[in-house]
Amino acid sequence: MAFPRPKPTTMETLAMERANPPFNIRKMSIAMHGSEKSLILKEKFMAEIARHPAFKLSDIHDLSKDELRERTMEKFASMVYFVTNESIETFQLRMQLIGIADPSFWTRFGVAYGLFLGALRSGATPNQLSYWIDRGVLGLNGVIGCFAMTELAHGSNVAGLETTATFDRSSDEFIIHTPHLGATKWWIGGAASTATHAAVFAQLIIDGKRHGVKTFVTQLRDTKTFTLMPGVNIGDIGKKMGRDGIDNGYIQFTYVRVPRAHMLMKHTQVSRDGVVTEPPLAQLTYGALLGGRTSMVTDSSNSAKKALTVAVRYAAVRRQFATGKNQLETQILDYPIHQRRLMPLVAQAIAIGFTGLRLQVMYEDMTQALEAMEPSDPNLNDILDKLKETHATSAGLKAFCTWACLDTIDKCRQSCGGHGYSAYSNFPLMYADFAVQCTWEGDNTILSLQAGRSLVGAWGAALKGKKLAPGVAYLNDSSTRTAKSDSSLSLDDIQKAWNCVAFNVIKKAAEEYVKLLKSGKSKDEAMERCSQSRFIAAKIHTIGYIFRLFKEAVQEMPDNEESKILKTVAKLYGLWQIEEQQGYFLKYGFYNAEQIDKVQEQVDALCAEVRGVAIPLVDSFALSDHIINSPLGKWDGSVYESYFSQVQAANPLPKEHPYFTRLIKPLLERQNEDMEDPGTAMGLEDELKEIEEERKGE
Amino acid sequence: MAFPRPKPTTMETLAMERANPPFNIRKMSIAMHGSEKSLILKEKFMAEIARHPAFKLSDIHDLSKDELRERTMEKFASMVYFVTNESIETFQLRMQLIGIADPSFWTRFGVAYGLFLGALRSGATPNQLSYWIDRGVLGLNGVIGCFAMTELAHGSNVAGLETTATFDRSSDEFIIHTPHLGATKWWIGGAASTATHAAVFAQLIIDGKRHGVKTFVTQLRDTKTFTLMPGVNIGDIGKKMGRDGIDNGYIQFTYVRVPRAHMLMKHTQVSRDGVVTEPPLAQLTYGALLGGRTSMVTDSSNSAKKALTVAVRYAAVRRQFATGKNQLETQILDYPIHQRRLMPLVAQAIAIGFTGLRLQVMYEDMTQALEAMEPSDPNLNDILDKLKETHATSAGLKAFCTWACLDTIDKCRQSCGGHGYSAYSNFPLMYADFAVQCTWEGDNTILSLQAGRSLVGAWGAALKGKKLAPGVAYLNDSSTRTAKSDSSLSLDDIQKAWNCVAFNVIKKAAEEYVKLLKSGKSKDEAMERCSQSRFIAAKIHTIGYIFRLFKEAVQEMPDNEESKILKTVAKLYGLWQIEEQQGYFLKYGFYNAEQIDKVQEQVDALCAEVRGVAIPLVDSFALSDHIINSPLGKWDGSVYESYFSQVQAANPLPKEHPYFTRLIKPLLERQNEDMEDPGTAMGLEDELKEIEEERKGE
């Protein structure tokens, strides 16, 4: 059967959308990627994995959990080569790309290199580190590591972990033990079927005394036979919402002995006699967490861009309802409400992307500053303040950026109507894979409260006249609190708006806290009781922070066509978020009711403006068809053809019907006598009469 | 290994939560279910399916798509018995319950009985209906129907469907044809492997002239052999986000002939000569849609209650962080922020539940009134107005209730931290199954705009002095617009708040519309351009409507312990939603800034109050462990034990490692010489030096 296509075809439509873009897509893309080098590397990585059989993506929706896991392991070999031969910077960019193409593998790989190796690097003495490197930790030739922290009954509260490591002086060993079901190590990525060793977090006990949670490298499996070591019981955690390519498992230890030297002793040492030496200072672990959070901010932007590329391209080629005499139906992206659904999310993804780039630079600067720092440095306190502030802000950023991305993915799915529900649209998997970002590495709500706690503290410091770190410096200027809009709705006016409102919501949280303290509550209880206000403070501060970083990045760009568009995008982001949080702007009087109406009008107008460049804009996200893995978002616009052929390829008809004879045939061939007068039971006799009467009346 | 349990155990904790509830759980449950009879029937249905092997739920997370589909068909036989032997009311309650236990089967069954049979009942002449009933439509003994409306390129716009049905006068047949790829019937539930016939929606063409979309019963498969009929090409749509138990398929027709009598002719008739007789009046289809939407409102409440039962019970038994010297960690439900996460959602689910009950009554009353209605009835216009208003409101309710439920499911998942990400928590499947409710039967955004359009119309009618239907009667009283809070935050004050704000947002949308008309836009264009304001109008009206129905239901209850709690719940719902939408309440001056602070304080206090009865309250939802299908929500609180044993049962260790030899062994046994100096490449030499230097400094 020939399939004549309506004119213009979806491919022609997308080509028209790309004709004469008002900016240079390549230059825009470079701006979004931070440098031309990053973009070129990304393109190289995309080409490599598109050609690598283990990174095939089009069939993953129909693979079983076991098949996905096996494929995960297939990818390791090639990556081990890169991790040991590429510079850290290059390899980080590679993993950033892998993170959006294949989150399962990214995680499994991250368990070995980010978590297990990371635990060694931060916790092992130099000798211990050399020992484990000699054993093959880097090349996986001898040791495949996993990270056994979380327990069935303990997640966030690491200090409350219940696995024990009891020192046996007679044999110079620790005895690792799981005392009850709730202390079972749980969610351990790689434990179910691929790890040989684990970094086990357990309560150090010597002579009946607890010394807190330390890390013990414990062998799980024989490296020759892969059988479990004595006393180690491992099970498979099974199906998850997403990331089924990771073999998460549980581990129970029954009096498992490890040599004393297998406790990581860079900080706390246990001597041959069982004497514990605690480190002189509690470790500064801010830096490590900061790196992880920065990468989650970037991942949020990239994952959102992936979903938006699909939704925006689909909205440009999907047509529904003809208006007036126009035979050609309208592109759904031309409906104002559809622009409202997608354009603010595009702006948000771009804003978070620029935030991630700047965070990365700040993180690197800070790491350098810390490394170069001398105890006598006159700027020591400033640097530490800045680090603490960025650390707290990064907690809020992790929370609100991952929430924003998850929300974006589902809104994109819904914007594609029914087709978004097809597995082949890739939205279901994107959602399922991403969803864990909101609960791991610190539950988002808890992290928001941490950010809020720090803001309350910053407020108190500002009151005492202390000069605050840049991220919260607006708290130093008390005129911020009562600022008013100049009605321009310019980028600067928007920035003033966020500072003003953030100032006020932080003040509210801090004043609640102080009031609770004065009423006799403990600090902990006072903090808990003002948690809703703390949460709001963190939310508003974080959005304002993203806006500021984005605005600064754009304002630093040369005055050209790209920066012009990005200023429009920044304005859309800032004003749309003001609309979303309008209550605070009205409450604290930065805007009045008419100005808020103007904000709404402006957002409408900006959505229409960004829609005009929507296709070139998502093209600048520079995500290949392979990465996107959704026929609905095909670069060339061949949406229906690609969708149809993927559905066909993934679902060949079985040669024989699997259950016709057993289940359908008996139903079809049942005799009527089996049933009691169905007509009466269904009320259908009445129904028929009614229809007849209705007919007579016509 | 013995597993000593910490004290109190999770089971003891839950028992303590249930001691001395301040209300009668049974009575509360009856109130929530509308009647004792409904509750008893539900309990009977729950017991039946818990014992029926085809309705086993604990293993569904690990079944493949093909296994799920086969199990779906296993359920048909028992249900055919009930559908033909139970009263409609009883059977509807049964299906309501099935809908939350097993959404896939509910849908597949609904395709045959709700959609296919529904199409016959609303579109067939009495003779045609008898004919199809004789052929076995009721008992499925001869005909298993499906509903072929949606096409690959057309969803919402039914009038734009492109499948053609061309009358062939010579043979007295219609020729059903798919002219191009975009016209392929898509998403057709049951088509892939279980239907014999389809109700096909196609453009009627006679002598080259189009007469609009009509319905044609078309045979797809031979009922003896199950082979496809000539010209019928069917494929499998494959994996979906959820509801994989339904065999959705696509259908392409290549000049397939059906007898003229297979066009459903209750409304439009085609004679032997090809003369078309159109019905005297466009059909009143409001009623049918209303029934579907009412059931989706109820389903939203029930599905949200299912998720909340799990999240609330888990939060009561999960402990994390000890405060002060207390050795026992705190139940996470005791943290104010956790109460904030869950209690408003509990209130919302209850509010939507009562709304569903009242909608059901309204729907039944209206159906009766319509049936009894004579053209000469003096109340004719009132009844029709009320019907139209309820129809429009139901569009908004469908949208905002399904969104609220989807949001609730994911918030519940996140509130369980990492364990919510396990398939066995059941949240992933709940989310995936429910997600389609936001896009099918009318995309939520489009439906909201329809509701908004009707509100704009109601506004215009009110301006002209017309007395409006009850749902929008507040628009008749112009003093509503400028109402102010009496600061009591009582149920009546809250109702006044919603009326005031709904009045104002509808006015804004209507005035924008009129302004656009006056500026020369067409009606269609003016409606599109004010769509953001229409959307807001629909949202605020709908929330206010839910609040009103819930409040009325509670205020009609006798004054007792149950109604007392429900009044607290209603207050929480109303005030929490005011907080969520606070911008409008400030903008239109119903509350001032201090009053809004009071609202926040009140919501905090109400959350704490409802937390006190949270476990008895979710117990009143009356959902069995089988239906909930989540160890995290086990009635007896044996959360960790149940979770552990389900994970174990679902994931037996394989006798042999599936890929150790092929993939892991070669990695582990690789020689170091394969690699180029990994230490240098990783920058680890530097790292080691740095650590050493750091050590020296200590």
Image (cartoon, coloured by chain):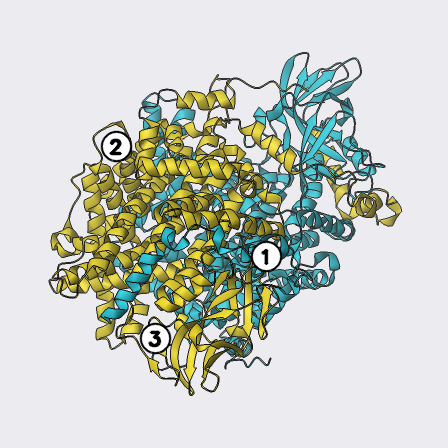
Chain colours: A yellow, B cyan
Are discs 2 and 3 located on one and the same chain?
yes
Q: Taking B68 as reference, is A37 left or right?
A: left
Q: Taking B105 as reference, is A534 left or right?
A: left
Q: Which mark is residue A268?
A: 3
The image shows residue A243, relative to residue B458, as above or below, that is below
Q: Amino acid at mark 2?
A: Ser
**For the residue labelled by badge 1, is the local secondary structure a helix, a strand or a loop?**
helix
Quickly name the residue at label 2. Answer: A563
Q: Nearer the viewer, residue B281 or A577?
A: A577
Local crowd size for mark 3, using a 10 Å CA cut-off: few (<14), some (14–19), many (≥20): some
Quickly name the residue at label 1. Answer: B665
- For residue B459, say whether it is visible: no
Q: Nearer the viewer, residue A379 or A697?
A: A379
Residue B280, percent across and down? 63, 24
Distance in Å between CA atoms under marks 2 and 3: 52 Å
Quadrant of the frame with the C terminus of chain A:
top right
